[in-house]
Image: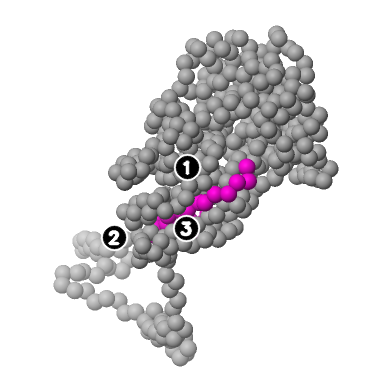
């Protein structure tokens, strides 16, 4: 694995050798100190290397691939070329966010980008693509539809970016990604960014898509933001969880809070419960229409309401300022999903609080996440709502009881053969069972249990 010595790296954006137009945009955004992922990824990307970067959500990785991409595209004007850069992302929300970031960094250049995701008009998107935007940002499913329809041309792609690659593969897009990569220019540069190392599917994509990549593992999934406090509160059942959630939202100090559930039905139910308690709450999940989801997130970011109840559809790609509290009403199904949920708070090194409500059915899952992340959650109790469940009881059998059990096993009928061998006596042979009632013993020599037929005596001569 290739590692870069941080001592040798530039410590300001002006040291990267970026163009004046890009530095002007960076200055307008008041970016002064590059983050660690930017310090390591930008110089390697500017050098033309393929990269496989593992970095935390909210670490500034969008700028880490957009700035080198823009630097490369503006260095040479190619008005007749088709799409020159392709950025693949797992969700519409993340694609929209990336487009906004692109617009901010490219504001003083002449480079254009188009968004291609589901939920938008296919014909309108095809018309935009015919204008040959330099950069296309989108989700694999809709991009593949345009590729198959002939409205997306990838022969001129110079830079391919796979952002949130682990999530993209977890959602089953591995085959779509490979189909989109196949027609791309073979001499392209590929930049892969992921919050986790990933599994077999990730290894397959890396082998088939990247060429001699440099691996930059800045933050493994286990290296969480130390400024984010992680707590658990034990609960007796779902009703108990609801009362605890209401108490937390009434007593914790926060500007914005997100509450995660594992199902759409639970999210809808919880939204109704909180509204009945006079909380201004909105619910976000996959069954919501795209325009409705977009409007909900816009209002949440503007601060028009303070509590968002969501499924994991909102766990990635959402950058919400002043989000200080995350509550796991349902525990995440895996360590990776847990990391992406809590990544909504504590972004860019800020602090935050994560509270997971744990009932008996959640304990083993919570323990497995602790082992995966190699940490121990802080246990907390709400005195006003203390329940009877405090975690599994540890049952230890006494040595005396175990000894008695062994003795019983030793002298019992199960070990009669062993006891007989110790006395030196052979076990008595079993006697054949006596026929009872109408049972007729089989005749010796007969094949089917019947006596052989008697031969007719020969007549005397």
Q: Which residue is drawn at 79% across and 32% down?
A: 14
* Quarter holding residue 443: bottom left
User: What SS does tag 3 mark?
Assistant: strand
N-terminal-most mark, 1 or 2 = 1
- Tag nearer the camera, 1 or 2: 1
- Tag nearer the camera, 1 or 3: 1
In space, the residues marked 1 and 3 are separated at their CA atoms by: 20 Å
On the rendered structure, is 218 left or right of 5? left
Residue that extends furthest to the left in the rendered view of this protein: 437
- Give the image location of residue 257, x and y in percent: 46, 44
Residue 334 in sight from this viewpoint:
no
Residue position marked by numbered label 1 in the rendering: 256
* Quarter holding residue 83: top right
In space, the residues marked 1 and 2 are separated at their CA atoms by: 86 Å
Q: Residue at x 57, y 51 (%)?
A: 228
- Give the image location of residue 181, x and y in percent: 64, 25
Mark 1 in CB contact with mark 3 (< 8 angstroms): no
Neighbor class of circle 3 (other Cα within 10 Å; few <14, some 14-19, many 20+) is some
Q: How is the image coloured?
A: one colour
Name the quarter where the C terminus is drawn: bottom left
On the rendered structure, is 70 left or right of 242? right
Residue position marked by numbered label 2 in the rendering: 448
User: What label sits on residue 232 in the rendered view?
Assistant: 3
Q: Which residue is drawn at 79% across and 45% down?
A: 6
In space, the residues marked 2 and 3 are separated at their CA atoms by: 73 Å
């Amino acid at each position: 694995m290739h590692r870069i010595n941080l001592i040798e790296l530039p410590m300001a954006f002006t040291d990267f050798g970026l163009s004046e137009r890009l530095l002007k945009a960076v200055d307008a955004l008041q970016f002064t100190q590059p983050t660690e992922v930017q310090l390591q990824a930008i110089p390697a990307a500017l050098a033309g290397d393929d990269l496989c970067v593992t970095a935390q959500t909210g670490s500034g990785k969008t700028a880490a691939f957009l700035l080198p991409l823009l630097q490369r595209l503006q260095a040479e004007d190619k008005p007749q070329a088709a799409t020159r850069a392709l950025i693949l992302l797992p969700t519409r929300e993340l694609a929209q966010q990336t487009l906004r970031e692109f617009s901010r960094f490219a504001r003083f250049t002449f480079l254009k980008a188009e968004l291609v995701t589901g939920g938008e008009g296919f014909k309108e998107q095809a018309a935009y693509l015919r204008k040959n935007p330099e950069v296309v940002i989108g989700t694999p499913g809709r991009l593949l539809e345009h590729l198959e329809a002939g409205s997306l041309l990838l022969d001129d792609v110079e830079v391919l970016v796979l952002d949130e690659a682990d999530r993209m593969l977890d959602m089953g897009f591995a085959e779509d990604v490979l189909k989109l990569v196949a027609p791309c220019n073979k001499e392209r540069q590929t930049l892969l960014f992921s919050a986790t190392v990933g599994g077999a599917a990730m290894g397959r994509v890396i082998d088939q898509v990247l060429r001699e990549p440099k691996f930059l593992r800045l933050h493994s999934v286990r290296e969480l933001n130390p400024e984010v406090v992680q707590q658990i509160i034990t609960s007796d059942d779902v009703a108990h969880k609801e009362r605890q959630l209401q108490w937390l939202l009434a007593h914790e100090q926060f500007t914005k809070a997100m509450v995660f559930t594992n199902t759409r039905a639970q999210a809808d139910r919880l939204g109704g419960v909180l509204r009945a308690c006079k909380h201004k709450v909105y619910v976000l999940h996959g069954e919501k229409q795209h325009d409705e989801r977009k409007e909900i997130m816009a209002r949440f970011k503007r601060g028009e309401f303070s509590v968002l109840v969501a499924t994991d559809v909102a766990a990635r790609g959402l950058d919400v300022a002043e989000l200080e509290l995350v509550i796991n009403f349902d525990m995440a199904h895996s360590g990776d999903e847990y990391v992406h949920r809590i990544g909504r708070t504590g972004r860019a090194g800020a602090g935050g609080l994560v509270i997971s409500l744990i009932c008996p059915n959640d304990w083993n899952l919570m323990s497995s996440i602790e082992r995966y992340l190699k940490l121990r959650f802080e246990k907390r109790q709400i005195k006003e709502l203390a329940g009877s469940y405090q975690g599994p009881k540890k049952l230890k059998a006494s040595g005396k009881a175990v000894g008695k059990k062994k003795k019983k096993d030793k002298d019992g009928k199960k070990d009669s053969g062993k006891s007989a061998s110790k006395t030196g006596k052979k076990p008595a042979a079993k006697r054949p069972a006596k026929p009872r009632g109408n049972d007729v013993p089989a005749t010796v020599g007969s094949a089917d249990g019947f006596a052989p037929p008697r031969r007719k005596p020969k007549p005397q001569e």
